[in-house]
Amino acid sequence: MRKDLEQILVEFRQEVERVATDEHLKQLHGKYFSREKGVLSAQLRRIREIPVAERPGFGQDVNLLKQEMEAEFDRLTRTLADEDYHRRVEQERLDITLPAVGLPRGSFHPIKMVEQELCGIFERMGYSIVEGPEIETDFYNFGALNFPPDHPARDEQDTFFVAGGRYLLRTHTSPVQIRTMQQLAPPLKIIAPGKVFRKDTPDATHYPIFHQIEGLVVAENVSLADLKGTLHDFARQFFAPDVRVRLRPSFFPFVEPGAEVDISCIFCGGSGCRICKQSGWIEILGAGMVHPNVFVNCGLDPEEHTGFAFGMGVDRMAILKYGVPDIRMFWENDVRFLNQFWYVQ
Ligand code: DAH
């Protein structure tokens, strides 16, 4: 090949070495292969200046140059496409051995979990679970439970009445005691979980809807000692093995005697703290021996039957055991709060 043409090939190859992008490749193509302005066309046009005798040789050399350059250019095009392909494969690489991203899992509401935890303790003691309606009559919610007609709890202030006063939203789970004694013959050992409703203004410890678990045992010769033993056993299982229990005399129309039940403070162990108001004790539920009038109202002979009953707030139990600062958090449904109860069950 003629020296001047060979020089063009050398320069072309040097430029090829430097091409890294498609854009650059296009420029190179234009510079060398364009019909009007390309280096090759310019060489072909030179033929007129070449002495006639040298023209055939020159023509062959330009053709050779053209073939070499085209081959070189094709190689370059393929290399670039190859590199691009590998780069994309690398970028889009999927590691199928990575663990999958888990979908968020739903779970029971904390109140439901604590309710199940509480019921489970009594079920293992041989209690059956029963349920009653949330919409009740005055008879089941108050009358049959020995509330006198003028008892303040019946007041509009506390009770949500519905259907023009014909019905009400139960203010406690105690009416399930009455329904159970009407329907099932003693001996009875039941617990009744459920929602209850009171016209309370929401604050850290009150909410107009909350949850209770009612307990009722009816049999021969049931004593206050049985009640205390049962509640102590329950408290040890739910709170801590070394928790102490005490009964303080109190009044509920449907029990006699009636008591409020305290546990030794689970926060300070009984020495006195802010939570137990320095008393060393925390109230957890109401209880007592079933009142003779309640047996009569259910068609049972009070001479023949004895029994105890108790009622506890599920929300309150959850608040105490899990250190929840505000009952309203159970209603906000903030998953950051709800997720923290995964370990309850
Ligand atoms: N029903 C009562 C309340 O809501 C709680 C209660 C107290 C239930 C004493 C009982 C009981 O069964 O014996 O405040």
Image (cartoon, grey):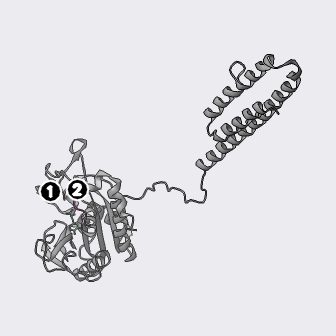
The CA span between labels 1 and 2 is 9 Å
Residue 190 is one of the magenta-drawn residues = no
Residue that badge 1 annotates: 153
Quadrant in which ligand 1 is drawn: bottom left
Indicate the amino acid at tag 1: Ala
Residue 66: image x %, image y %? 79, 30
The boundaries of the magenta stretch are 323-327
Label 2: state its secondary structure: loop
Residue that badge 2 annotates: 171
Whether the residue carrying mark 2 lies under 8 Å from ligand 1 is answered with yes
Indicate the amino acid at tag 2: Thr
Q: Relative to 340, say whether 136 is above or below.
A: above
Give the camera-side residue of 168 and 21: 21
Crowd tier of the residue under label 1, counting other residues whose Cα lies within 10 Å: few below 14, some 14–19, many 20 or above: some
Name the residue at 39% across, 73% down.
123
Q: Quadrant of residue 81?
A: top right
Residue 336: image x %, image y %? 34, 56
